[in-house]
Image (cartoon, rainbow, N blue to C red):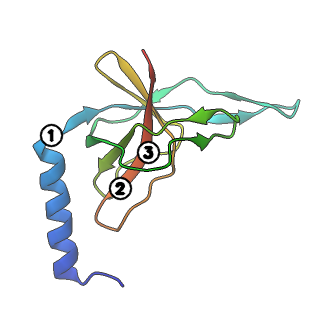
Amino acid sequence: MALNAAELLIQTKTTAAFIEADKIPLVVRRRERIQLDSGGYTWSEPEELEPQDARLLPSQDKEKELETDEGKAAHPDYVLLMMPGADIQRWDRFMLGEFEFLVLSEPHGPEYEIKVDVMRCGR
């Protein structure tokens, strides 16, 4: 069931206020996957996107592991919450303090917010 205009406005404002309460300025680093003639692939040099606001939340998901394209088990430790229109994709990375995070999922969620599963992958 789709939200009417008033409900959508209220939900969007609620999401914005929730992010604002504990926001992190996020600079996403994106690398493009490049197909090689040999049949494999490599990654381009990372490109930094414009800063965006987000909120990082501990994951409440019962699923403890995900299989990546590379076959490695990944643990979605956190959910990143962003506003509609945010520029975030699977395999993007970002730094928070001295830690690097990896986006594990495609953006999902209702029309008033964007969520992605992320994991801390090191420094």
Question: What x and y, as percent, mark residue 16?
Answer: 17, 55
Total marks shown come to 3
Q: Disc 1 to disc 3, how far (Cα)?
A: 18 Å
State the mark number for residue 114.
2
Q: Could you tell me the amino acid type at mark 2?
A: Ile
Question: What x and y, as percent, mark residue 35?
Answer: 76, 36
| Among the two numbered marks 2 and 1 on one chain, the one whose residue lies closer to the N terminus | 1
**Can you say whether 116 is above or below 70 in the image?**
below
**Location of mark 1 (residue):** 22
Quadrant holding the N terminus: bottom left
Q: Closer to the camera, 48 or 8?
A: 8
Name the residue at 19% across, 78% down.
7
| Among the two numbered marks 1 and 3 on one chain, the one whose residue lies closer to the N terminus | 1
Left or right of residue 40: residue 70: left
Q: Closer to the camera, 89 or 119?
A: 119
Quadrant holding the C terminus: top left
Q: Disc 3 to disc 2, how far (Cα)?
A: 10 Å
Name the residue at 24% across, 84% down.
4
State the mark number for residue 117.
3
Q: Could you tell me the amino acid type at mark 3?
A: Asp
Question: What x and y, as percent, mark residue 60?
Answer: 35, 48
Label 2 sits on a secondary structure element that is strand
Q: Could you tell me the amino acid type at mark 1?
A: Asp
Label 1 sits on a secondary structure element that is loop
* Front: mark 3 or 2: 3
